[in-house]
Amino acid sequence: MTAGIEPPNERQYVITLSCSDTTGIVARIAGFLADAGGWITEAGYHSDPATGRFFTRQVVRADSLPFGVEELRERFAAVAADLGDATWNVTDTGVIKHMVILVSRELHCLHDLLGRVALGELPVQIDAVIGNHENAAEIVEAHGVPFHHVPFPETDKAAAFAEVRKLVDQHDPDAVVLARFMQILPPELCDAWAGRAMNIHHSFLPSFVGARPYHRAHARGVKLIGATCHYVTPELDAGPIIEQDVIRVDHSDTAEDMVRRGRDIERLVLARGLRWHLEDRVLVHGNRTVVFH
Amino acid sequence: MTAGIEPPNERQYVITLSCSDTTGIVARIAGFLADAGGWITEAGYHSDPATGRFFTRQVVRADSLPFGVEELRERFAAVAADLGDATWNVTDTGVIKHMVILVSRELHCLHDLLGRVALGELPVQIDAVIGNHENAAEIVEAHGVPFHHVPFPETDKAAAFAEVRKLVDQHDPDAVVLARFMQILPPELCDAWAGRAMNIHHSFLPSFVGARPYHRAHARGVKLIGATCHYVTPELDAGPIIEQDVIRVDHSDTAEDMVRRGRDIERLVLARGLRWHLEDRVLVHGNRTVVFH
Amino acid sequence: MTAGIEPPNERQYVITLSCSDTTGIVARIAGFLADAGGWITEAGYHSDPATGRFFTRQVVRADSLPFGVEELRERFAAVAADLGDATWNVTDTGVIKHMVILVSRELHCLHDLLGRVALGELPVQIDAVIGNHENAAEIVEAHGVPFHHVPFPETDKAAAFAEVRKLVDQHDPDAVVLARFMQILPPELCDAWAGRAMNIHHSFLPSFVGARPYHRAHARGVKLIGATCHYVTPELDAGPIIEQDVIRVDHSDTAEDMVRRGRDIERLVLARGLRWHLEDRVLVHGNRTVVFH
Amino acid sequence: MTAGIEPPNERQYVITLSCSDTTGIVARIAGFLADAGGWITEAGYHSDPATGRFFTRQVVRADSLPFGVEELRERFAAVAADLGDATWNVTDTGVIKHMVILVSRELHCLHDLLGRVALGELPVQIDAVIGNHENAAEIVEAHGVPFHHVPFPETDKAAAFAEVRKLVDQHDPDAVVLARFMQILPPELCDAWAGRAMNIHHSFLPSFVGARPYHRAHARGVKLIGATCHYVTPELDAGPIIEQDVIRVDHSDTAEDMVRRGRDIERLVLARGLRWHLEDRVLVHGNRTVVFH
């Protein structure tokens, strides 16, 4: 069912860059692309007045340039070198991205992602799904994706994480998606997968960090519940937020109703955050994100 | 994967009734239930001032009554007979509901419903999926559900609909879900399945009735796009609305972007409308619905 | 401009009650009203499974009863006495409610409330506005409402609160609205005005309790900002929540943009919460609220 | 109370341009600004693939340029002349914008706009309010704004419109806001005020064009109601849409409830659309708008 994943018809190069803000950056980049005949189909700019940092994302039609992505990288490196302390990246939509999904017992986000990838809605190939329970095996394998069961005994989580790491790293994935994976990543994995590991937390962060957020939301009597997609960092549920959303609840919703109804917003928020990540729309800025829509 | 569908732990009887409004209806129904020892876990009432029509939905714990659902129906019939021109129904959550899904080529709603049913999120069993294309077969069968391919040649749609009707009616389903089924039901099927056939239309009705609503929304320059779940009636996209929702778009969204982004709202709106239908929360009132949340 | 405040055409009595849940409460209350010929125009019920507490709100047309509000109270007292540990209230929409508004320097909520009252959108009379700055005087007096300036010197807030209390209590208002009043009510005032003092907090509680919530929201990089209307209790920003809502922000919004944009959601959330309070739709349940819409 | 309207501390020039899309436009404009030392604080770009039209909005700090707004216009004219069929504009946030508001009997949008302007939330001065009823006079004059009463007798609307036009045109306003003005502008006024006359329509267009939209929404049984801010064109309610939003309703809302509840969304949508117009964020593209946020 994953046959739907093909490069888009119009191959494009996506350039992202951040650097210290100063006069003339846009002119420099736009001039470089114009001189090469580049046809820009999307361009986003952001200048943060508080930190003096500049961010941009440019999408260029591959067939408008007289050279390939490797030469684009070489030439763009020279441009970036002129800009103070620039961090940059160039990706090619003709190269399929890869991801690995980690799950536990709750499978609604997994089902949703499998469906979206099968239908070609997300530009990614799922290399593997790893679960600390076995209940995901059937649906994952029905989608033609390998499933790995890695139990997480309370007494030896370190070994389990080592096994997960081995399984993940062999794919060198562009995204490691914790799709309601209920284990806390150890710091060394947060570091190894920095900027690639994404979590869906079932609350509107920073409210209700940690366990049982819906039950705590119910106890507090909130009128909206939410979900948050964020990059994973060593501090629990405190990484840069990519996307959030909420739905309305009322006094008639029990904590269990909130759990059930919250699934809809978890599915959507994770799918949106993941899409933006895969399309190189998300630039991390300290503990915040710039997301170019 | 459909093994998850079991009767809920707490079996309940759901009573719905509409009648001409007058003083004392609530007292009559509540008195009847109280006399029988009924423990009401949910109760909704609505009185429409414009039409003088009264609506109610009562949920009673089965184990609080000294008799079963058949006797409840008999006894309640006597109550209802005292109320002017009452229409009523009593269902038992211990009896699993059934549905048939009709699809065409676009499968995002189908994937979503299959996933929800597999996870036990919707109280229903899918008896069959019928498609006028074959591309749904694999995922449907992976979920252990029979798939029937019924081609719809332009020259003989009547025969195709007759075949669909035969396939559907053998299950006598509680819901016939048109999950982006792009064929217009003939009037005799609308009548046969009145109050059971539900459609998801990919616009915020009554805007953009009919074909290519996203393209027309794009041409009009709207700032929100939506989806509508409604009961099917002979007039196209004009039946009683069960649920609607919208998402924001802007000038950078092409018609194709709207098609893609609209899928998220179609999935959600159909799933919500279907859940309410299956939980007997929806009462039709002329061309409108009363939905007890 | 406050001439618009008149009793509604159709005078109604609003009954609210909470008690321990048991079989037959609805029948008891509905039977009482039916026997008296009461025409119920709205009825809400809620039973909380976790605490076993039952809540109801009934609206009855005054002209359908053969007696007035005082006799209704007497008769209903007898009904309530039969129900375990009931708390109840009966109000008359023919009696205009009164409120006092406390403000500081930020006046957007004040302007909004003055406009709504002037247009007859809120069923209340504003008896007075009290400000710890003078800048509200002109608009308040233009609306024909008395304005009292009570400075809050850092060195003697106790005296200032005593003055505020005297000014408020002479009106015995149904609502004391802290419309961006930046002073923390002392516990004795929280007690004196329990269930009547309402605050609008400029965050989606429980996130960002206390000062400068927009700046902290900006620092955390949230993608939605919100506002919360809640009853005031001695613990800061921790009282029962009446209403909340959010709006979307993104990386281009500075903290100052959030302050500006948040005003729209503060205005709306306070106006909605206040309307529900004035219509006796809000019942407090521990630290949560039941809101009958 | 309008004393709050002053130029912002940081004076800025806002450049908007649209032209046929081709390679190098961004480089040309950015290069021009960089050569002049211009500090760009906001930059938006949009290229419409369907029509091949390019749009941009650039905000430059006035104090970063070695010349004033007149010379900027002269120099930019030379840049624009190089671009095919460019339409462009340069405005100066140091020059206060002006508007005239037209109202009828419903005053909620008027109250809202007066409050926002008084609080400095909208960068505009209200030169006059014109009403075809007298009920707005008191609040308008309390805000220090001239009010003109122009009756609209059924038998001679042409004369009334001539009077309105005379009153409006003497201010040559940047915006003519129809804040629930229930008269249909004649074509010659639509032409005279093209791109400046804005209307708030109380439905989610294109649903319910024309009169009594809430009553028609109620009859259709929609689950969301909305409002639309659009530029006025000769075809009724068919002009380019600037902003829309919706709120949820249910079966318990009468048409009158929808009228009341809809006011909140009308206020917000008009205020947002007007702000964007005044900040030169809205570019008209055929019957659609590009809105740079």
Image: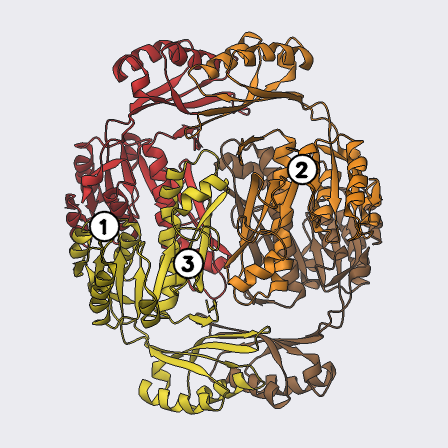
Chain colours: A yellow, B red, C orange, D brown
Q: Amino acid at mark 3?
A: Asp
In this rendering, do the residues under marks 1 and 2 share a single chain? no
Amino acid type at circle 1 is Glu
- Residue A61 is left or right of residue D33, and the answer is left
Image-based side of B257 in relation to C91, left or right: left
Quadrant (top left, top right, bottom left, bottom right) of the C terminus of chain C: top right
In this view, the residue in front, C127 or B182, is: C127
In space, the residues marked 3 and 1 are separated at their CA atoms by: 55 Å
* Residue with the mark numbered 1: B154
Q: What residue would you read off at disc 2?
A: C190
Q: Amino acid at mark 2?
A: Cys
Secondary element under disc 2, as helix, strand or loop, is: helix
Tell me the chain of label 3: A
Q: Position of residue A104 (x, y in %)?
A: 26, 52
Please report the residue visible at 60 percent of the width from the left and 45 percent of the height from the top. Answer: C269
Q: Position of residue D280 (x, y in %)?
A: 64, 68
Task: Compute the Cα span from label 2 to label 3.
Answer: 35 Å
Seen in the image, is C261 located left or right of residue A274? right
Residue shown at 40% from the left, 12% from the top: B34
The chain carrying label 1 is B
Please identify, in this view, whether the residue under mark 3 or under mark 1 is nearer the observer: 3
Looking at the rendered structure, whether the residues under marks 2 and 3 are on a common chain is answered as no
D197 and A77: which is toward the camera? A77
* Neighbourhood count class around disc 1 (C-alpha, 10 Å): few under 14, some 14–19, many 20 upward: few
Specify whether C256 is left or right of D104.
left
Q: Residue D153: x and y, percent? A: 78, 42
Seen in the picture, residue C140 relative to A18 is either above or below; the reply is above
How many badges with numbers are in the image?
Answer: 3
Q: Does residue A54 sit above or below D223 in this rendering?
A: below
Contact flag, marks 1 and 2 (Cβ < 8 Å): no
Residue C2: quadrant of the picture:
top right
Check disc 3 and report the residue beneath it: A237
